[in-house]
Image (cartoon, rainbow, N blue to C red):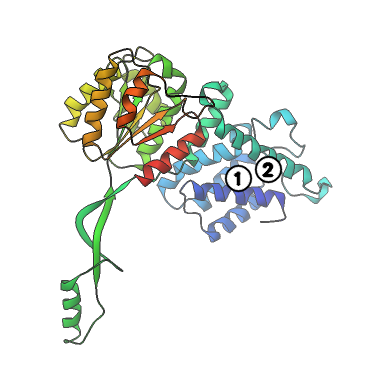
Amino acid sequence: MSDNPAEAILLGFTVALRAAGVPVTHDRAQSYLVAAAMAGLDDAAATYHAGRATLCGSPADLERYDQVYQAYFDHRSGLPRRRPAPPTAVTTSSSILPASESDGGDGAEDDEVVRAMASTAEVLRHRDVATLTANEKARLATMFATLDVRPPLRRSGRLRPWHRGTLDASRTLRASLRRMGEPAALEWRRHALRPRPVVLLIDVSGSMSAYADALLRLAHRIGRQTTGMETFALGTRLTRLTRALGTRDVERALIAAGQTVPDWSGGTRLGETLTVFLDRWGRRGLARGAVVVVFSDGWERGDAALLGEQMARLHRIAHRVVWVNPHRGKDGYEPIQVGIQAVLPSVDDFVAGHSLAAFAELLDVLARA
């Protein structure tokens, strides 16, 4: 880590980019420091474009760069001035102070601001989404880009060369023939891996309305990193959201999803909507062999027995069923709802879904599936 506070913050930004999936090499990071110094750290626009020019290696990196830049610097407020940020501003903007000997400072105040920002972001990651203010929700929305999405994998019937596994007699023989019959190194092969299908079923009833925005953002984030994912909304009826959430821009995707769902913040008939899903989409094999994730608090207005039967039916055809309950991570929670008790026998993983940290743990569960 650099002794220069400004360089340390810029290097921290490159680490955040790398964590978000942008392949930032050491050479690119050094080029970024040089370009930012030449542009001037007090010029927010110049620093922003310096990073895009030096840290992004492909068009696919530009979207992640913008998301991480906004989450890390909150560039809507511009780069901070030489005056230390007041304590009340720590929660809404981050700080980069240019290194200057004329300030007469030793960088201690800069370090305090950086540590405070890191602490604030960490606290926000663990806050219940339903309790956030509008400003905090806006900040949290930019932090979804930091979630590490690793799609579940399954074995394919196709074999591929590998450094160990099963002996590939044909390739070994051909290698020997190329050497005029002389012994050659043994060739091996194994089954190739391909992404396993993922299906998200999101409860958009009134009891889940406080979490709907965050859950749809999570679905959009997973869908951008996963091939062939399907998303449905559960309420009084079943609504397919895959096309609406396929838009690259997350804000436009959420608007399209809101316009697609006719029963937003209505009642909950999980048993009936699961029946429709399995009858219409299960027969097509959409859920067969897939990881199915249900986001719901389990408040069922319909027949709980029907819900239990349909969950058992879903469990028989899916590879794994994950139930995400926003109340699961709260102190004192007990699964006493009739709907939850009906589905638990058919659930492989019962996890929390109330915060960004809980979403990160859910993604780990998906990757292991």
* Residue contact between numbered discs 1 and 2, judged by CB atoms under 8 Å: yes
Vertical comparison of 21 with 181: above or below: above
Q: Earlier in the sequence, mark 1 or mark 2?
A: 1
Check disc 1: other Cα within 10 Å, few if <14, some if 14-19, many if 20+.
Answer: many
User: Where does the image place residue 356, in percent across and percent down from the top left?
Assistant: 50, 34
Figure quadrant of the C terminus: top left
Circle 1 residue: 47
| Nearest to viewer (mark 1 / mark 2) | 2
Circle 2 residue: 96
**32 left or right of 303?**
right
Give the residue displayed 25% in from the left and 33% down from the top.
Answer: 315
Label total for image:
2
User: Where does the image place residue 264, in percent across and percent down from the top left?
Assistant: 36, 15
Residue 94 seen in render: no
User: Where does the image place residue 30, in percent across and percent down from the top left?
Assistant: 59, 58
| Residue 133: assigned label | none
